[in-house]
Amino acid sequence: MNGSTQNMQLPTILFICIFFISACTSLSHRISEESKEFRSPSEAKAIISILKSQNHTLKTIKGVGKITFLEKEEKEMTTRIAWVASTPDKIRITLSSVSGHPVISAASDGQWFYFVSHAKGDFYKKRPTNFNMKRFFSISIKSEDIVNILFGRIPVVEYDSTDLMEDRSIEGRSGKDFESAEVSSLNNDIKGNKNSFVLLLKNKWGNVREKIYLNDRQDAHKIEMFDLTGALVYRLELIRMQEIKSYRVPYRLKVSNDDGAGFQLDLDRYWADAAVSPSVFTLTPP
């Protein structure tokens, strides 16, 4: 090999070496960064255990407040609401007019679901298997999920695997929640301002069935439920929490779907460990 050829090849060899060293360094950096996004499986398991044990000694509640129905993220109607609930799946909800007269009632005693339109005189009952409260709330949500939410518990689906990773998508809540500046400030404390995480619960095929968003104290502030096709069923946002006795329960929450339908619930008065008769969860024709 003559000297001219060697002089031509040397820069080429140096360029190739520099390129591969740079590429390997960049790849190593990306792998290191991505690995930091995921938390250990044991941490995910511990968080799920904590979520399932929230307010586990709370068995019965009563409450009154107001509910704002949403259509395409816009306020459609606000009315008074009262509820009684007992674990694990008993609930009664009544919507009232401005004058205080009941308009619609719905109840589940664990065996039957009841619906009464006091204004029209309509009444029906059916088995609650795979039944959701879309007719009542204009959104597909199970009655047992409503019970858990009112009790200050996070609904957790059946799952086969989990991922726990940093949530870099938080830039404020989606849509509108009609909250005051004071509540907005409290909500920032609920969500935290750094090191937020999202817990993914997956089925055996690897499809995400639920996302649970956690703040830096590992308190859940939002969940998203998905069906088997991956479509969003509903999104729950815990806008403000309150302390009742020794329990941490919602004060304001919002449930919606991707079409902007749903409701915002303000829990004005809340009685924990309330005396509740089992007969209250059975409705009869008006």
Image: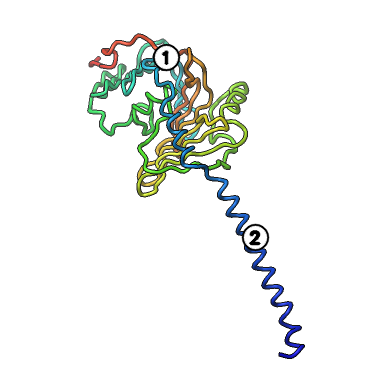
Residue in front for this viewpoint, 277 or 113: 277
- Which residue is denoted by mark 1 in the rendering? 63
| Mark 2, secondary structure of its residue | helix
Question: Residue 195's x, y, as percent?
Answer: 59, 37
The residue at 44%/33% (across/down) is 48
Residue in front for this viewpoint, 176 or 182: 182
> How dense is the environment of label 2, judged by Cα within 10 Å: few (below 14), some, or many (20 and up)?
few
Check whether the beta carbons of the residues at disc 1 and disc 2 lie within 8 A of each other: no
Whether residue 130 can be seen here: yes
Question: Residue 172's x, y, as percent?
Answer: 58, 35
Is residue 72 positioned above or below 104 on the image?
A: below
Q: Amino acid at mark 1?
A: Gly
Whether residue 71 can be seen here: no
The residue at 48%/39% (across/down) is 199
Residue in front for this viewpoint, 12 or 145: 12
Is residue 214 positioned above or below 94 on the image?
A: below
Q: Residue furthest top?
A: 275
Q: Which quadrant: the N terminus?
A: bottom right
Q: Amino acid at mark 2?
A: Thr
Q: Which quadrant: the C terminus?
A: top left
- Which residue is denoted by mark 2 in the rendering? 25
Foreground disc of the pair 1, 2: 2
| Mark 1, secondary structure of its residue | strand
